[in-house]
Amino acid sequence: MPFTLFHLGPLFLIGFLTLSLLYLPALVLGGTIVDIEPLISRLQCPTCPSHGFFHSFLGASIGGIFAALIVFALKKRVDKVMSLLKLEQPASFKKIMLSGLVGAWSHVFLDAPLDPRMQPFYPLPDNPFYGLYGVFECYAACAVLIVLSAIFYYYTFKK
């Protein structure tokens, strides 16, 4: 999937529905930070595969932990922004860490069905998720989820 825009629909909806369990900023950053890898890959070699180590559960775990550490370090600032958005939520280090990991793993689950070269269970070479759905279905579902997330946010938090 091209970079992170489409990942935001599922991430926001998961985040809005699990505010008591997951910390939305860490979930979103964890779910998008993984796409630094294809960005760098495309800039260095436009014809090379874009999904490498960080698009495996092992690599995504590292990315998710890194995202959680960033959010935890900036938590006071992040909480001010969340308050402006009417999305205040308490968050412990454990909750932030879990959220970063869930976000990163969701990224792998979303991308793996689209790329036969991905190795979600690296170092194992296979991709058992490939072909579960197609590119059109994935993009359409993600676009719909972005709209549903915006509607859910408006009617749940902005009023």
Image (cartoon, helix red, strand yellow):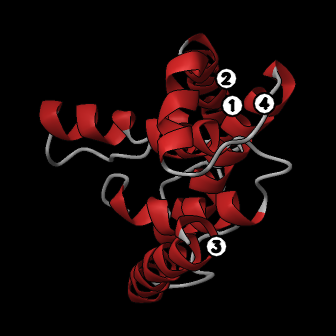
Mark pair 3, 1: CA separation: 31 Å
Residue beneath the point at 66% across and 69% down: 129
Q: Are marks 3 and 4 in contact (CB under 8 Å)?
A: no
Q: Is residue 143 left or right of residue 112?
A: left
Which sits earlier in the primary sequence, circle 3 or circle 4? 4
Find residue 91 and name its label: 4
Find residue 61 and name its label: 1
Residue 85: image x %, image y %? 49, 50
Within 10 angstroms of label 1, few (less than 14), some, or many (20 or more) residues?
A: many
Mark pair 1, 2: CA separation: 6 Å
Residue beneath the point at 58% across and 23% down: 71
Q: Is residue 112 visible?
A: no
Residue type indicated by callout 1: Ser
Find residue 156 and name its label: 3
Mark pair 1, 4: CA separation: 20 Å
Task: Give whichever of 27, 83 is nearer the camera.
Answer: 83
Residue 146: image x %, image y %? 45, 74
Find residue 110 and name its label: none
Query: Which mark is in front, 3 or 1?
Result: 3
Find residue 65 and name its label: 2
Which sits earlier in the primary sequence, circle 3 or circle 1? 1
Residue beneath the point at 64% across and 17% down: 72
Mark pair 3, 2: CA separation: 29 Å
Which sits earlier in the primary sequence, circle 3 or circle 2? 2
Check the picture and name the quadrant holding the N terminus. Answer: bottom left
Which sits earlier in the primary sequence, circle 1 or circle 4? 1
